[in-house]
Amino acid sequence: MSNDRRRETLLTAGLVHPRPDAVVATLFGSDPFFLAEDKVQVKYEMLRAHVVDGVSVTDASRLHGYSRAEFYLVADAFSEAGMVGLLEKKRGRKGPLKVTEEIRGFVEGLGEISGAKAAARVQERFGVSLHRRTLERILSE
């Protein structure tokens, strides 16, 4: 696979390093196999440089375009899940916790209504308190 095709694939998958120009480790300048745009490869090589080559955390993170704090997050993710841990997942909640399918359907059926009025109707019908913005997002979908 050419590096252009590889970059395209990485972009599509959301795996492009956020600061490829900050990757200054010699591996990434000497061999076309090592691509600074490949976020997963850069993270792996950063960890390898520290664990195998004995490079300090500060230097390993700097050479690979990450902060020390990011290094520790990457190391934790790798120790928990291996290579899969190097793939980034969206952090935080995956959506509002209190909005069930039943509530969503009810709100969508309300039609043109303000978020505050929708919140009052949900509270009245289901006994669940939701923020007006949460309901406005549902109404605008």
Image (cartoon, helix red, strand yellow):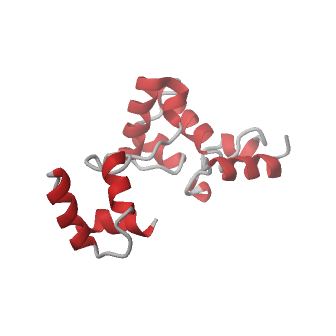
Query: x, y percentage for residue 3?
Result: 80, 47
| 13 is higher (above) or lower (below) than 87 | below
Q: Residue at x 31, y 64 (%)?
A: 135
Identify which residue, 98 or 62, lies in the foreground: 98
13 with respect to 130 (left or right): right
Query: x, y percentage for residue 43?
Result: 54, 39
Query: x, y percentage for residue 134?
Result: 30, 62
110 with respect to 60 (left or right): left
Identify which residue, 80 or 49, lies in the foreground: 80
| Residue 130 can be seen, yes or no | no
Q: Residue at x 70, y 45 (%)?
A: 35
| Residue 58 can be seen, yes or no | yes
Q: Residue at x 14, y 52 (%)?
A: 127
| 92 is higher (above) or lower (below) than 110 | above
**How many circles with numbers are drawn on the protein?**
0
| 22 is higher (above) or lower (below) than 100 | below
Rendered image quadrant of residue 131: bottom left
Identify which residue, 106 or 56, lies in the foreground: 106
Q: Residue at x 52, y 35 (%)?
A: 86
Rendered image quadrant of residue 28: top right
Q: Quadrant of the N terminus?
A: top right
Query: x, y percentage for residue 106?
Result: 33, 57
